[in-house]
Amino acid sequence: MERGHAGLGPRESLAPEEELEPPGPAWSGDSGNVSQSHSSASGLWEEEDQEAALAEEGEDGERGVRRRSSWGREVATDAAGLDLSLLRRTAAGYATYLLPAAGEGGGPEMEALDKSLEDLLTRVDEFVGMLDMIRSDSSQVVNESVPHIHTKATEMSEIYRKIDKLEAFVKMIGSHVTKMEEQVTKAEAELGTFPNTLKKFLHTINVPSFLNQRIGGVRYGSPI
């Protein structure tokens, strides 16, 4: 029996009471340390997981940015290619429309364009000639006509002064004539008119012949 008991393992050698004994304080402390180490390890694992997730998100964002930039470059390249092709087609169309073909003098469009250009150049030449004529006329007016007009204006100012003096003289004569008429009217009213018999007598008087000759010999001469 002792051999059999000795050949058993450590758990088999223990009594049932010893196996059912609750763990002591040392075991409970160890379990607390284990739980704390497990919680700290789990916290480290969570931080590592978060860092890995953030790194993956950053990589995904960089990939998205690279994809968008590459897509934008592709779109810009395609647009530039389309613009370049459109520009080439437009230039080729204008070239075929304007430039004459090899061995030909050009189409009707080219002839119409040449005619329009010739007409336009003719009108431009006419306009330039008209401008030159206006410039020459303006210079002639400024150099010749304006001094002549200024001289005549000074002369006319003297004539205007003479006219003003003559108007004043005419007004003075008119006032004297008016006064004379008033005096004649007053004298006629006071003295009366000559009788008709006296008038007839004066008309019947003959003038001597020598007086008639002297009167006929006198001629009027303009005052100097």
Image (cartoon, helix red, strand yellow):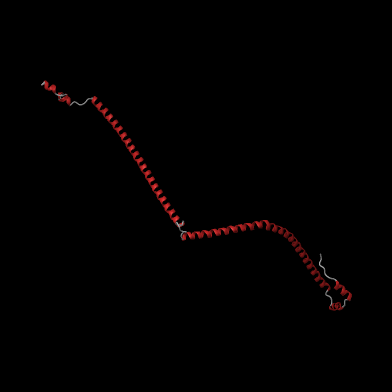
Q: Report the number of numbered marks.
A: 0
**Residue found at the far top of this picture:** 2
Say whether residue 99 is left or right of residue 131. Answer: left
Residue 4 appears left or right of 164: left
Q: Residue at x 13, y 22 (%)?
A: 7
78 or 113, which is in the foreground? Answer: 113
Q: Is residue 79 above or below residue 100?
A: above
Residue 74, horizontal then vertical, whole percent:
38, 46
Q: Quadrant of residue 29?
A: top left
Q: Nearer the viewer, residue 8 or 154?
A: 154
Tell me the quadrant of the picture where the N terminus can be found: top left
Could you tell me residue 189's position as x and y percent? 81, 72
Question: Is 12 placed left or right of 199 in the picture?
Answer: left
Left or right: residue 175 compared with residue 49: right
Quadrant in which residue 210 is drawn? bottom right
Residue 76: image location, x then y, percent: 40, 47
Residue appearing at x 11%, y 21% in the figure: 3
Q: Quadrant of the C terminus?
A: bottom right
| Location of residue 148 by image quarter | bottom right
Q: Residue at x 76, y 63 (%)?
A: 166
Question: In the rendering, at what x and y percent does residue 184 appear?
Answer: 81, 70
In this view, the residue in front, 105 or 34, is 105
Task: Specify the farthest residue to the front.
Answer: 103
